[in-house]
Amino acid sequence: MKALKYVIVYFIILQFVVPLLVPSHEVYHNRIDYELTKSNLHDIDAVLDQIKRQISRNKSDNYIILLGDSVIYGSPGNSDQPVNVYMEQLARQTYGNEAPAIYNLSMPAMQLGDIYTMLLKLDEHKISTDRVIFNIRYASFVERTPWPPAVFWLKDELRKLDPETFAHIRPQLEATGYTGPEGLYERYKHLLHEDLLPKVSMFRYKDFIIKSVKHAYSKARGIPIPDDALGDPRPWFEKEGLEQYLKSDEIANSYSDMSFDLSEESPDVFFLNQIANHQQGTDTMIVLTGVNQQLMKDYVQKEGYKQNMSRIDRMMESFPFPYINLEGKIDDALFTDHTHFTAEGHEALGSLLWNAYIK
């Protein structure tokens, strides 16, 4: 019995100590670590823990949250080059020591359903969503047939945090292959791995513990830490094979010129309204990220594409938040493909977002 007490005390101590032992920059450095998180979505909770700890340490609610897909995340560049880095530089020029921190909680492939769920997770971690910038894109409103799922990453989180919304969208998710746990054993396993173990610090931080040990070993041996870029960050005009890729079904479907259904029957309009309801009375800004006009000319010059873009703009006028459409606003030379940016492109994007947000 005495030994059990020691085990319990040791476990409790570990719960508090483990998050303090992992260097904060290994958990969050300008953005979520995609390569880790795509295989273990519970890493997001460790990131939110660290951000909440920093906010509490600073005793300040002076921060902005960025949410979105790969464009806001900063693909394909590394974690020193996402848009929030350049926004923070401009913020310091404007406000000096009073500049807000800007936390980038985007993930490649995030859908509006994921963004809504991230807002709920921020609530859960008691991180304010009073100042939020998030992006939409043309492809957000293309009819799903049925792919991609309206909640790409955070289906189980939505199920836990908002069962009613999850029940509403579940048929669309099931059409893309989602299956919930069936049977007693599957439900038990799901409860253990998705609900119970993630609350244990050793489990919650295990990916970052391994990462920090590997980095410490490399530094001790004089081995450079690998760059964390997700792809080739060169400008699009220096790459081969892009034109062929742009003819693929993936791109053709994402930039279809078929007329949009912008009613609540659209999963994305539904989630956009959910986000708007959640963000009532806040300093939220919505950004429509544009495409490389030269590289995508065969798509953007179609009359149906132009009409759909105009309809998105008209729909966004009904929302009580500032909205900016960045289509054609950034020099095509600053793109690394049809939609992502070079480091200089992220800098230009950061300037546009910061100047629009502080107006």
Image (cartoon, rainbow, N blue to C red):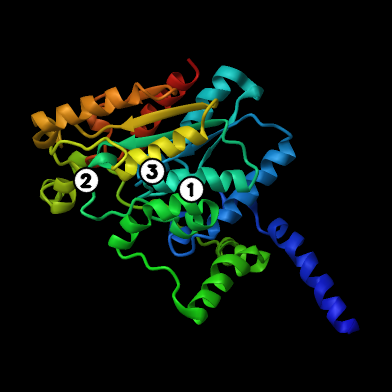
- Name the residue: 61% across, 69% down: 197
Image position, residue 226 (x, y; %): 45, 58
Q: CA distance from mark 3 to mark 1?
A: 9 Å
Residue identified by numbered label 2? 143
- Name the residue: 44% across, 75% down: 182
Image position, residue 129 (x, y; %): 57, 35
Q: Nearer the viewer, residue 111 or 26?
A: 111
The kind of residue on which mark 1 rests is: Thr
Q: Quadrant of the N terminus?
A: bottom right
**SS type, badge 3:** helix
Image position, residue 221 (x, y; %): 57, 66
- Name the residue: 24% across, 50% down: 144
Q: Earlier in the sequence, mark 3 or mark 1?
A: 3
Toward which corner of the image does residue 343 lie, by quadrant? top left
The kind of residue on which mark 2 rests is: Glu
Residue 112: give its label: 3
Q: CA distance from mark 2 to mark 1?
A: 21 Å
Mark 1 nearby-residue class (10 Å; few <14, some 14–19, many ≥20): many
Q: Earlier in the sequence, mark 2 or mark 1?
A: 1
Q: Nearer the viewer, residue 200 or 19?
A: 200
Residue identified by numbered label 1? 117
Q: CA distance from mark 3 to mark 2?
A: 14 Å
**SS type, badge 1:** helix
